[in-house]
Image: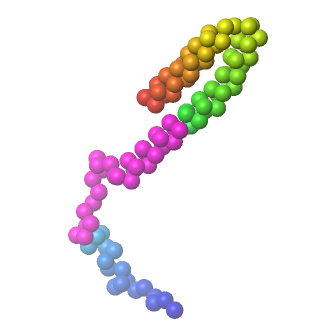
Amino acid sequence: MGRHLQERDLRSLERRSMYSIFHPLDVDEPLPRELIQEGWRQRMCEIRVLEITGALYLPVLMVVMIVLGSMHVNPIFGFVAMATLFGAFLIYVLSARDR
């Protein structure tokens, strides 16, 4: 089946010959794949914050609607309260992106 490797077949893997083909990596230079993975982690965190905020917004909105409806508040004030609530959640999401 496969050919058995001998020591002479592995000579290309010696350190001197490897350094002649490939230069050693610079310790201070970040690798592009690491930057891509780091960016992906940050986007995933941002998506999680957005999902959590979106999941919390609807129940809070329903509670505000029920409370304002049971208090027989003017509908215009209700819309203002809901718009303020939406603005507060939006500001929270945008500020969480900067953290």
Q: Is residue 43 left or right of residue 11?
A: right
Image: 99 above or below 27 = above
Q: Nearer the viewer, residue 95 or 78?
A: 78
Residue 79 horizontal/vertical position (percent): 61, 16
Q: Is residue 12 left or right of residue 72?
A: left
Whether residue 10 appears in this view of the structure is yes
| Image quadrant in which you'd find residue 69 | top right
Q: Residue at x 47, y 41 (%)?
A: 43
Residue 77 horizontal/vertical position (percent): 62, 9
Whether residue 16 appears in this view of the structure is no
Q: Nearer the viewer, residue 11 or 53?
A: 53
Q: Disc count in the image?
A: 0
| Image quadrant in which you'd find residue 62 | top right
Q: Residue at x 59, y 29 (%)?
A: 53
Q: Is residue 43 left or right of residue 21?
A: right
Residue 91 horizontal/vertical position (percent): 49, 22
Q: Residue at x 22, y 69 (%)?
A: 20
On whether residue 98 falls in the magenta region, the answer is no
User: Residue extending furthest right?
Assistant: 70
Residue 12 horizontal/vertical position (percent): 31, 77
The stretch of residues the image draws in magenta is 19-47
